[in-house]
Image: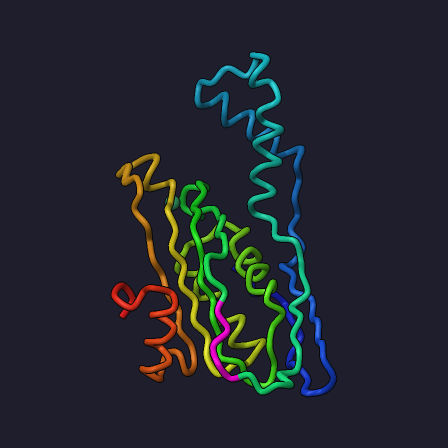
Amino acid sequence: MSQAALPQPAPSGPAPWRPRVAHPEADVDLVAAEEAAADLLRALGLPLGTEAMIDTPRRMAHALAEMVTAPPFDFTTFTNAEGYDEMVLVEDIAVRSVCEHHMLPFTGVAHVGYLPGDRVLGLSKLARLVDFYARRPQTQERMTTQVADHLQRHLTPRGVGVIIEAEHTCMSLRGARAHGTRTVTSALRGHLREDPAARAEFLHLTRHSKEAT
Ligand code: ZN
Protein backbone atom coordinates (compact mmCIF):
# COMPACT_ATOMS: atom_id res chain seq x y z
CA MET A 1 0.00 0.00 0.00
CA SER A 2 1.61 3.24 -1.08
CA GLN A 3 1.60 6.18 1.26
CA ALA A 4 -0.24 9.32 0.29
CA ALA A 5 2.07 12.05 -0.93
CA LEU A 6 1.97 15.25 1.09
CA PRO A 7 4.53 18.00 1.38
CA GLN A 8 5.94 18.70 4.81
CA PRO A 9 5.88 20.51 7.12
CA ALA A 10 2.93 22.72 8.01
CA PRO A 11 4.21 26.29 8.28
CA SER A 12 3.78 28.38 11.39
CA GLY A 13 2.82 31.36 9.17
CA PRO A 14 -0.54 32.68 8.07
CA ALA A 15 -3.50 30.30 7.90
CA PRO A 16 -4.86 28.35 6.15
CA TRP A 17 -2.50 25.77 4.67
CA ARG A 18 -4.00 23.39 2.10
CA PRO A 19 -1.64 20.66 0.91
CA ARG A 20 -3.20 18.24 -1.59
CA VAL A 21 -3.61 14.61 -0.52
CA ALA A 22 -3.71 12.05 -3.35
CA HIS A 23 -2.89 8.43 -3.99
CA PRO A 24 -0.46 7.80 -6.85
CA GLU A 25 -2.39 7.83 -10.15
CA ALA A 26 -3.93 4.37 -10.72
CA ASP A 27 -4.08 2.83 -14.17
CA VAL A 28 -7.82 2.04 -14.41
CA ASP A 29 -8.95 0.23 -17.58
CA LEU A 30 -12.75 0.01 -17.33
CA VAL A 31 -13.11 -1.81 -20.66
CA ALA A 32 -10.75 -4.58 -19.54
CA ALA A 33 -12.48 -4.67 -16.14
CA GLU A 34 -15.87 -5.08 -17.80
CA GLU A 35 -14.61 -7.97 -19.97
CA ALA A 36 -13.04 -9.61 -16.93
CA ALA A 37 -16.27 -9.21 -14.94
CA ALA A 38 -18.20 -10.92 -17.75
CA ASP A 39 -15.63 -13.77 -17.77
CA LEU A 40 -15.96 -14.14 -14.00
CA LEU A 41 -19.76 -14.28 -14.08
CA ARG A 42 -19.70 -16.81 -16.94
CA ALA A 43 -17.13 -18.92 -15.09
CA LEU A 44 -19.51 -18.97 -12.13
CA GLY A 45 -22.17 -20.43 -14.41
CA LEU A 46 -24.36 -17.33 -14.40
CA PRO A 47 -26.48 -16.42 -17.42
CA LEU A 48 -25.46 -13.10 -18.97
CA GLY A 49 -27.96 -13.23 -21.80
CA THR A 50 -30.98 -12.13 -19.78
CA GLU A 51 -32.30 -8.61 -19.94
CA ALA A 52 -31.62 -8.12 -16.24
CA MET A 53 -27.97 -9.19 -16.41
CA ILE A 54 -26.83 -8.11 -19.84
CA ASP A 55 -25.40 -4.89 -18.41
CA THR A 56 -24.16 -6.40 -15.14
CA PRO A 57 -20.45 -6.70 -16.11
CA ARG A 58 -20.35 -2.97 -16.89
CA ARG A 59 -22.11 -2.10 -13.61
CA MET A 60 -19.78 -4.41 -11.66
CA ALA A 61 -16.68 -2.83 -13.18
CA HIS A 62 -17.86 0.71 -12.43
CA ALA A 63 -19.01 -0.13 -8.89
CA LEU A 64 -15.72 -1.81 -8.00
CA ALA A 65 -13.68 0.99 -9.55
CA GLU A 66 -15.62 3.53 -7.48
CA MET A 67 -15.03 1.59 -4.26
CA VAL A 68 -11.26 1.45 -4.73
CA THR A 69 -10.64 4.95 -6.08
CA ALA A 70 -10.38 7.83 -3.61
CA PRO A 71 -10.65 11.36 -4.98
CA PRO A 72 -7.85 13.72 -3.89
CA PHE A 73 -8.65 16.40 -1.33
CA ASP A 74 -7.05 19.33 0.45
CA PHE A 75 -5.81 18.67 3.98
CA THR A 76 -6.70 22.15 5.16
CA THR A 77 -5.17 23.26 8.46
CA PHE A 78 -5.30 26.56 10.32
CA THR A 79 -3.07 28.21 12.90
CA ASN A 80 -4.37 27.36 16.37
CA ALA A 81 -4.73 31.06 17.10
CA GLU A 82 -6.95 30.59 20.16
CA GLY A 83 -4.56 28.08 21.68
CA TYR A 84 -7.35 25.50 21.91
CA ASP A 85 -5.85 22.59 23.83
CA GLU A 86 -8.76 20.23 24.56
CA MET A 87 -9.64 17.21 22.49
CA VAL A 88 -11.23 17.62 19.07
CA LEU A 89 -13.33 14.53 18.38
CA VAL A 90 -15.51 13.60 15.41
CA GLU A 91 -17.64 10.53 16.03
CA ASP A 92 -19.53 8.12 13.80
CA ILE A 93 -17.75 8.91 10.54
CA ALA A 94 -19.07 6.47 7.95
CA VAL A 95 -16.58 3.79 6.90
CA ARG A 96 -17.20 2.06 3.55
CA SER A 97 -14.32 -0.08 2.43
CA VAL A 98 -13.44 -3.34 0.70
CA CYS A 99 -11.46 -6.13 2.34
CA GLU A 100 -8.39 -6.94 0.31
CA HIS A 101 -8.70 -10.69 0.91
CA HIS A 102 -12.15 -11.19 -0.61
CA MET A 103 -12.94 -7.87 -2.34
CA LEU A 104 -16.15 -7.79 -0.29
CA PRO A 105 -17.34 -4.66 1.52
CA PHE A 106 -16.87 -3.88 5.18
CA THR A 107 -18.85 -0.99 6.64
CA GLY A 108 -19.10 0.75 9.97
CA VAL A 109 -18.01 3.91 11.75
CA ALA A 110 -14.80 5.65 12.77
CA HIS A 111 -14.21 7.92 15.77
CA VAL A 112 -11.24 10.22 15.25
CA GLY A 113 -9.86 12.61 17.86
CA TYR A 114 -6.75 14.69 18.38
CA LEU A 115 -5.20 17.05 20.89
CA PRO A 116 -4.22 20.16 18.89
CA GLY A 117 -0.68 21.50 18.80
CA ASP A 118 0.18 24.60 16.74
CA ARG A 119 -2.43 23.85 14.08
CA VAL A 120 -6.04 22.68 13.84
CA LEU A 121 -7.63 20.77 10.98
CA GLY A 122 -10.81 21.74 9.14
CA LEU A 123 -13.42 19.49 10.78
CA SER A 124 -14.76 17.98 7.56
CA LYS A 125 -11.23 16.83 6.73
CA LEU A 126 -11.32 14.08 9.35
CA ALA A 127 -14.17 12.44 7.43
CA ARG A 128 -12.38 13.04 4.12
CA LEU A 129 -9.25 11.42 5.51
CA VAL A 130 -11.16 8.32 6.67
CA ASP A 131 -12.81 8.02 3.24
CA PHE A 132 -9.46 8.55 1.52
CA TYR A 133 -7.96 5.50 3.22
CA ALA A 134 -11.21 3.48 3.07
CA ARG A 135 -11.54 3.57 -0.70
CA ARG A 136 -8.80 1.02 -1.33
CA PRO A 137 -8.59 -2.74 -0.93
CA GLN A 138 -7.94 -2.64 2.81
CA THR A 139 -7.62 -4.38 6.12
CA GLN A 140 -9.34 -2.66 9.03
CA GLU A 141 -6.15 -2.79 11.09
CA ARG A 142 -4.03 -1.07 8.43
CA MET A 143 -6.65 1.56 7.72
CA THR A 144 -6.88 2.47 11.42
CA THR A 145 -3.09 2.86 11.59
CA GLN A 146 -2.91 4.88 8.36
CA VAL A 147 -5.46 7.47 9.54
CA ALA A 148 -3.67 7.86 12.90
CA ASP A 149 -0.20 8.07 11.34
CA HIS A 150 -1.32 10.54 8.69
CA LEU A 151 -2.66 12.91 11.35
CA GLN A 152 0.37 12.44 13.57
CA ARG A 153 2.78 13.11 10.71
CA HIS A 154 1.05 15.96 8.90
CA LEU A 155 -0.89 17.80 11.61
CA THR A 156 1.71 17.20 14.35
CA PRO A 157 -0.85 17.32 17.17
CA ARG A 158 -0.01 16.43 20.76
CA GLY A 159 -1.95 13.21 20.42
CA VAL A 160 -4.20 11.22 18.08
CA GLY A 161 -6.81 8.51 18.65
CA VAL A 162 -8.63 6.48 16.01
CA ILE A 163 -11.24 3.79 16.65
CA ILE A 164 -12.95 1.92 13.85
CA GLU A 165 -15.84 -0.51 14.36
CA ALA A 166 -17.03 -2.37 11.30
CA GLU A 167 -18.91 -5.40 10.07
CA HIS A 168 -17.15 -7.45 7.43
CA THR A 169 -19.43 -9.03 4.85
CA CYS A 170 -16.74 -11.65 4.13
CA MET A 171 -17.55 -12.90 7.67
CA SER A 172 -21.29 -12.24 7.76
CA LEU A 173 -22.36 -13.34 4.24
CA ARG A 174 -20.10 -16.33 3.73
CA GLY A 175 -17.72 -18.60 5.64
CA ALA A 176 -18.56 -18.26 9.32
CA ARG A 177 -21.78 -16.31 8.50
CA ALA A 178 -21.19 -14.45 11.72
CA HIS A 179 -23.95 -11.92 11.18
CA GLY A 180 -23.93 -8.82 13.36
CA THR A 181 -20.39 -9.19 14.68
CA ARG A 182 -18.35 -6.01 14.87
CA THR A 183 -14.60 -5.81 14.64
CA VAL A 184 -13.08 -2.99 16.72
CA THR A 185 -9.59 -1.63 16.05
CA SER A 186 -7.80 1.30 17.65
CA ALA A 187 -4.63 3.31 17.15
CA LEU A 188 -3.39 5.79 19.75
CA ARG A 189 -0.45 8.15 19.25
CA GLY A 190 1.44 10.70 21.35
CA HIS A 191 -0.32 11.88 24.52
CA LEU A 192 -3.32 9.65 23.92
CA ARG A 193 -1.07 6.64 24.03
CA GLU A 194 1.26 7.68 26.84
CA ASP A 195 -0.91 9.70 29.26
CA PRO A 196 -3.40 7.43 31.06
CA ALA A 197 -5.81 10.33 31.79
CA ALA A 198 -5.90 11.53 28.15
CA ARG A 199 -6.27 7.96 26.96
CA ALA A 200 -9.12 7.31 29.39
CA GLU A 201 -10.87 10.51 28.30
CA PHE A 202 -10.68 9.54 24.63
CA LEU A 203 -11.92 6.01 25.27
CA HIS A 204 -14.69 7.32 27.52
CA LEU A 205 -15.82 9.89 24.95
CA THR A 206 -15.91 7.22 22.27
CA ARG A 207 -17.66 4.80 24.68
CA HIS A 208 -14.87 2.25 24.42
CA SER A 209 -13.47 2.47 27.94
CA LYS A 210 -14.34 -1.22 28.55
CA GLU A 211 -13.47 -2.69 25.16
CA ALA A 212 -10.18 -1.04 24.32
CA THR A 213 -8.38 -0.68 27.65
ZN1 ZN B 1 -12.35 -10.55 3.83
Q: Position of residue 210 (x, y in %)?
A: 25, 66
Asked if residue 176 lies left or right of residue 97, the reply is: left
Residue at 37% in and 41% down? 170
Asked if residue 193 lies left or right of residue 10, the reply is: left
For the stretch drawn in magenta, the main secondary structure is: loop
- Taking depth in this image into account, of 6 and 11 the one nearest to the observer is 11
Q: Quadrant of ligand 1?
A: top left
Asked if residue 94 lies left or right of residue 27, the reply is: left
Farthest residue, direction top: 50
Indicate whether residue 173 is drawn in magenta.
Answer: no
Above or below, 56 against 197 in this view is above
Farthest residue, direction right: 14
Quadrant of the rendering where the C terminus is positioned: bottom left
Q: Position of residue 9 (x, y in %)?
A: 64, 81
- Taking depth in this image into account, of 145 and 160 the one nearest to the observer is 160
Residue at 44% in and 63% down? 111
Residue at 67% in and 58% down? 72
Q: Position of residue 33 (x, y in %)?
A: 60, 35
Q: Position of residue 127 (x, y in %)?
A: 56, 60
Residue 191, by quadrant, is bottom left
Task: State the count of labels.
Answer: 0
Residue 61, by quadrant, is top right
- Taking depth in this image into account, of 174 and 117 the one nearest to the observer is 117
Indicate whether residue 87 is drawn in magenta.
Answer: yes
Residue at 71% in and 76% down? 16
Display coloring: rainbow
Above or below, 209 against 37 in this view is below
* Magenta segment: 85-89
